[in-house]
């Protein structure tokens, strides 16, 4: 069944690694945890077991940040992963939940239309009208289900939710209980329950967290990749994983095109060229690592189905232009200036320059 799923959940995709880590994990485990904090770190960052088995890294970045995140989950405080788009907040959240409780599906997706019922509970209104309030008519939210089972609940894009909906978490996080006044009862969290929330730096000012709610989170800020090589490695790994999921044939080479896409995105993000000699205007988009992954994956599909199987500049040019030029007026000026003052002056990028000119 899992093989037919386009994107298996982390606990299914990496089930073999989680089982191996659990079997060989002889360190103390917090109540309700499937793995010890040290084993969770190995699962997230990769490593070799005593028998030589290699655990693939799920996150490439500062080790200390992940240590702080894992340590937070072992306390009575919730975890908030904060960062600009494309810094793997959702990815880290999913894998932490899979490693800690073996279930990453207890998820609330925050939007402007998210209601309090998504955090607390709802009702089966047919049964409610027929029977009145009852346990059978109650529809538990993912957070309530996590409290009952002692698992990790995930809240995505917390700052996209209205402030009054966000604040419905306060009692849950402080009292570790969720009152159900209609039934005169409450759900008390079992050991192992915690919440991992994500929030976007760019959404500050949309629905800022109240001070009361923010105090109940430990915040870990996930940065963009520190170096070009680190970002190239991340993009290459994720593109390979997505290609396997989509059953794409192997494309020839491609690392040089990944490096070029990453370089373009990093230079435009930072507002200067890699050598620091030329200052650049930055476009309105984020040009995140996630967007670089999307550009390369689309290029692989083009090379596979409409090319000769070799990833070339022409396969990624359209995706880059689409990512950079979000505003058809101001961003196009930024892109044209970058193309003529930077890309054109690099002899080894002549094919890339021609390909971009054709789609610009």
Image: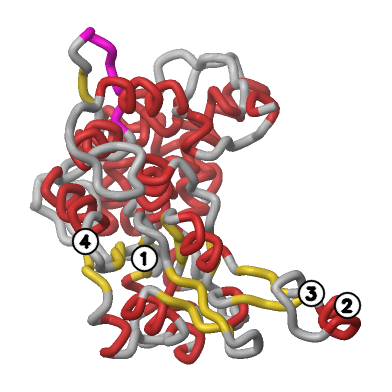
Q: Marks 1 and 3: which is nearer the front? A: 3
Q: Position of residue 124 (x, y in %)?
A: 79, 74
How dense is the environment of label 2, judged by Cα within 10 Å: few (below 14), some, or many (20 and up)?
A: few
Q: Which residue is mark 2?
A: 126
* Viewer-side residue, 47 vs 231: 47
Q: Which residue is mark 4?
A: 75
> How far apart, in angstroms, are the residues tagged by discs 1 and 3?
48 Å
How dense is the environment of label 3, judged by Cα within 10 Å: few (below 14), some, or many (20 and up)?
A: few
Q: Could you tell me which residue is drawn at 20 percent across and 43 percent down?
A: 61
Earlier residue among tags 3 and 4: 4
| Quarter of the picture holding the N terminus | top right
Q: Is residue 245 left or right of residue 356?
A: right
Earlier residue among tags 2 and 1: 2
> How far apart, in angstroms, are the residues tagged by discs 3 and 4?
35 Å
Q: Are marks 2 and 3 in contact (CB under 8 Å)?
A: yes
Element assignment for label 1: loop
Q: Could you tell me which residue is drawn at 26 percent across and 52 percent down?
A: 341
Tell me which segment is drawn in magenta.
51-57
Q: Quadrant of residue 89?
A: bottom left
Q: Main secondary structure of the magenta part?
A: loop
Labelled disc at residue 124: 3
Q: Could you tell me which residue is drawn at 18 percent across and 38 percent down?
A: 28
* Viewer-side residue, 93 vs 23: 23
């Amino acid at each position: 069944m899992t093989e037919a799923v386009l994107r298996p959940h982390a606990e299914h995709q990496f089930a073999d690694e989680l089982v191996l880590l659990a079997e060989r994990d002889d360190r103390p485990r917090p109540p309700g945890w499937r793995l010890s904090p040290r084993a969770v770190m190995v699962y997230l960052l990769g490593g070799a077991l005593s028998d030589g088995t290699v655990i693939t890294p799920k996150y490439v970045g500062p080790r200390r940040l992940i240590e702080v995140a894992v340590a937070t989950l072992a306390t009575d405080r919730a975890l908030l992963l904060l960062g600009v788009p494309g810094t793997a907040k959702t990815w880290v959240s999913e894998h932490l939940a899979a490693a800690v409780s073996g279930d990453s599906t207890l998820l609330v997706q925050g939007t402007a239309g998210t209601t309090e019922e998504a955090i607390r509970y709802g009702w089966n209104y047919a049964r409610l009208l027929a029977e009145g309030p009852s346990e059978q008519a109650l529809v538990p939210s993912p957070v309530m289900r996590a409290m009952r089972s002692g698992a990790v609940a995930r809240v995505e894009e917390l700052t996209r939710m209205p402030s009054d909906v966000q604040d419905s978490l306060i009692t849950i996080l402080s009292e570790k209980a969720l009152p159900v006044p209609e039934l005169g009862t409450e759900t008390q969290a079992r050991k192992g329950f915690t919440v991992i929330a994500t929030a976007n730096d760019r959404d500050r000012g949309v629905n800022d967290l109240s001070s009361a709610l923010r105090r109940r989170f430990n915040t870990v800020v996930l940065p963009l990749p520190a170096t070009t090589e680190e970002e190239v490695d991340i993009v290459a790994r994720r593109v390979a994983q997505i290609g396997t999921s989509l059953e794409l044939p192997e494309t020839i080479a491609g690392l040089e095109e990944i490096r070029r896409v990453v370089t373009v995105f990093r230079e435009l993000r930072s507002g200067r060229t890699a050598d620091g000699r030329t200052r650049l205007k930055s476009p309105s988009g984020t040009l995140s690592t996630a967007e670089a992954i999307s550009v390369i994956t689309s290029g692989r599909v083009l090379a596979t189905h409409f090319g000769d199987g070799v990833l070339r500049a022409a396969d990624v040019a359209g995706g880059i232009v689409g990512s950079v030029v979000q505003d058809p007026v101001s961003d196009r000026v930024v892109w044209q200036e970058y193309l003529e003052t930077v890309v054109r002056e690099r002899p080894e990028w002549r094919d890339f320059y021609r390909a971009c000119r054709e789609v610009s």
